[in-house]
Image (spheres, rainbow, N blue to C red):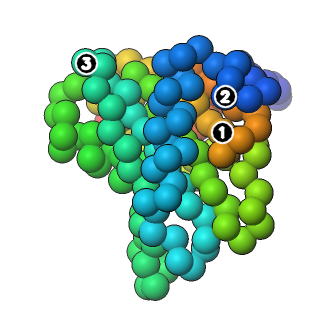
C-alpha cells in the first residue's frame, strides 16, 4: 500500500487593500457584478470577472431558476461569455465574489462548486495555460490560487476517454 499527499499553495491576504493592483481591480469588478446576479431563491449573489491575455475584462453573475437546479453559476456564465466575446483568447485571471443576502455575511473567500471546478479545468486545458483565481467576499480575507486545476485533484479529463 502507498499513501499519497496532495498539496497546493495559495496566498492569503487580510483584505483587498493588500492585493497587487491588477488583482484588486479585478476583484472589485467581481464584487460590483454581484448586484446584477439573479438569485431570488438562494439569496446568494455571485459575481465573477475575467482578465484576458489581451488586457480586456468581462463580468458575469449567477442566474437561478425556479426549476432548480436549472440555474447556472457565475463561473460557468463567465466561461461561456468569454468564449463568445473573445474566442481563442486566453483567460489569465478570474476573480469571484459573493453577497449572501440571507445572512448578510460576505467576509471570507468562497470557492467554486464541483461543476465549476471541472469547467475551469476544461478551460485551462483548452487554452493550455493556467488560470489564476482571486477569491473573496465583499470584504475581508482574499485568497489567490495560481492554478485553478489545483482545486480539482484527480480530475477527470478528456485524456481519460482515450
Q: Is residue 120 above or below residue 128?
A: below
Gap in angstroms between the C-alphas marked 2 and 3? 24 Å
Q: Are marks 2 and 1 in contact (CB under 8 Å)?
A: yes
Q: Residue at left 46%, top 62%?
A: 37
Query: Which residue is the site of mark 3?
Result: 54
- Image coordinates of residue 51 in percent, x first then y, are 37, 27
Query: Which residue is the site of mark 1?
Result: 136
Earlier-in-chain disc, 2 versus 1: 2
Frontmost residue, 153 versus 56:
56
Element on which disc 3 rests: loop
Answer few, some or many: residues within 10 Å of disc 3's Cα (few below 14, many 20 plus, some between 14 and 19): few
Q: Is residue 46 above or below residue 21?
A: below
Q: Which quadrant of the figure contains the N terminus?
A: top right
Element on which disc 1 rests: strand
Nearest to viewer (mark 2 / mark 1): 2
Q: Is residue 105 above or below residue 4?
A: below
Element on which disc 2 rests: helix
Gap in angstroms between the C-alphas marked 1 and 3? 24 Å
Q: Residue at left 18%, top 40%?
A: 85
Query: Which residue is the site of mark 2?
Result: 16
On screen, residue 50 versus residue 101, left or right, reads left
Amino acid at each position: 500500500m502507498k499513501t499519497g499527499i496532495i498539496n497546493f499553495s495559495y496566498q492569503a491576504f487580510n483584505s483587498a487593500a493588500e492585493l497587487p493592483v491588477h488583482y484588486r481591480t479585478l476583484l472589485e469588478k467581481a464584487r460590483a457584478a454581484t448586484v446584477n446576479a439573479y438569485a431570488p431563491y438562494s439569496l446568494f449573489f455571485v459575481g465573477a470577472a475575467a482578465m484576458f491575455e489581451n488586457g480586456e475584462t468581462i463580468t458575469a453573475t449567477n442566474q437561478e431558476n425556479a426549476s432548480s437546479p436549472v440555474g447556472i453559476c457565475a463561473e460557468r456564465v463567465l466561461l461561456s461569455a468569454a468564449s463568445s466575446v473573445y474566442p481563442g483568447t486566453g483567460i489569465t485571471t478570474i476573480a469571484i465574489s459573493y453577497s449572501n443576502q440571507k445572512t448578510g455575511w460576505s467576509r471570507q473567500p468562497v470557492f467554486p462548486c464541483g461543476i465549476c471546478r471541472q469547467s475551469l479545468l476544461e478551460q485551462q486545458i483548452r487554452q493550455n495555460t493556467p488560470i489564476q483565481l482571486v477569491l473573496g467576499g465583499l470584504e475581508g480575507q482574499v485568497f489567490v490560487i495560481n492554478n485553478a486545476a489545483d482545486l480539482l485533484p484527480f480530475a477527470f479529463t478528456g485524456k481519460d476517454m482515450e
